[in-house]
Image: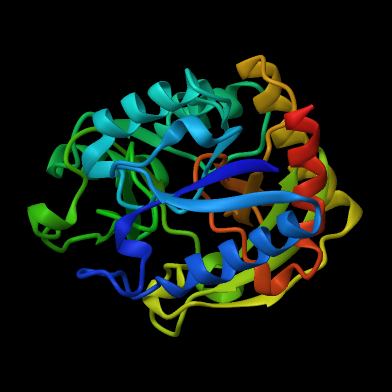
Amino acid sequence: MTRICFLTSADMMKDRPGAREDWFEFDLEFGALSKACEAAGISLEACIWDQDFDASVYDGFMVGTVWDYPPKLDNFLKTLDRLNAIAPVWNSPALVRWNIEKTYLRELDEAGAPSIPTLWADKADDAAIAQGFERFGGDKLVVKPLVGGGAWRQALVRKGEPLPAADELPLGACLIQPFLPGVPEEGEYSMIFFGDRFSHGLNKRPKSGDYRVQSLYGATEAVWTPGEDELALARKVLSTAQDITGEDAFLYARVDMVRGLDGELALMELEIIEPYLYPEQGPDLGKVFVEALKEKLG
C-alpha cells in the first residue's frame, strides 16, 4: 500500500500540552482526507514535523497543519529539504520558500494578478505607519509580518493612536495595507483547488467588531459558490504563480480574495504551504484531493 505522511504540528494534537484552541481543524481535515485516501488504497498517516519518525517508510509527504513553524522557520525548511531527499514533498520545498514570504504577493501583482495595495517596510515603526497613512489615506491600517499565518503578529493600527505593543507587531520586515471595510462587511472568499481541479468555495466572516477571519478569533464559515468570473480570477492567480515558479499544478492551493477599495475582488493571499482546507464546506474534498494526489504519485 502507498503510504503518505501528513505533516502536522504538536499543538494541533488535542491531547498534547499547549494544544491550540483550533486543534479540531486538524481532526476535520485529516479525517476527510485520510478516509478518501483509504478508499483509494492509500494510507495517509499523520506525523509531527519536528519530532522523530521513520521517514523512510513513506512514498511522499504532504505539508499539512504545520502551524507552529514561523518561530522555527530555519528548522522547518531544513526538515522539508531532508524529507524531499527521501520522497517528494508537496507542495515542494521550492514552492514553500517562494510562498513563505509575503513578497510573493508583489511578484503576483507585478505579473498582473489583482492584489491589495501594499507598502513594504523594514520595520513596523512610527515612520512606516505614517507613510502608510499618507499613501492609503483612511484611519486604519493592517500590519502583517513577511512570514506568518493565522493572523500571527498581525496588528490593526488606528490613526492618531499609539502603536500596539512590540510583541503584537511583526518582528522585522512587514507589509502595510489599508484596512478594507469589505472584510468586516462581507468577509473573505476562499476557493480551494487540488491540482487544476476546483474543489469548493466558502465565505469566512469575522465576528462582530473584529476583522480576522480565522475560527480562532470567532469567525464563521459558510458554503459559497463562486461564479464564472470569480473562478476565472482565481485560476488567473494560480496560472500566474505557476508561470513565476516554473512549477506545474500544485497539489493543493487556496485562493483567498476580498473586496478591495474599488469594489472589485482582489487577492488577499495565495495559500500553497499549509492552508486549512475547510472540509465541512467541501463534501467532495477528499475525492478531488485523491485524484490530484494520484497524479503526483504517477
Q: In this view, does 229 lie to the left or right of 205?
A: right
Q: Which quarter of the image is occupied by the C terminus?
A: top right
Residue pictured at 73% horizontal, 23% vertical: 248
Q: Where is residue 284 in the image (x, y as percent from the top left)?
A: 81, 64
* Between 211 and 81, the one nearer to me in the picture: 81
Q: Position of residue 214 (x, y in %)?
A: 45, 68
* Between 52 and 261, the one nearer to me in the picture: 52
Q: Which quarter of the image is occupied by the N terminus?
A: top right
Please identify the quarter of the rendering in which residue 50 is found.
Answer: top left
Q: How many marks?
A: 0
Q: Position of residue 120 (x, y in %)?
A: 34, 31
Residue 275 visible in the current orientation: yes
Q: Where is residue 249 in the image (x, y as percent from the top left)?
A: 74, 30
Residue pictured at 53% horizontal, 66% vertical: 183
Q: Which residue lies furthest to the right in this view?
A: 228
Q: Is residue 52 above or below residue 33?
A: above
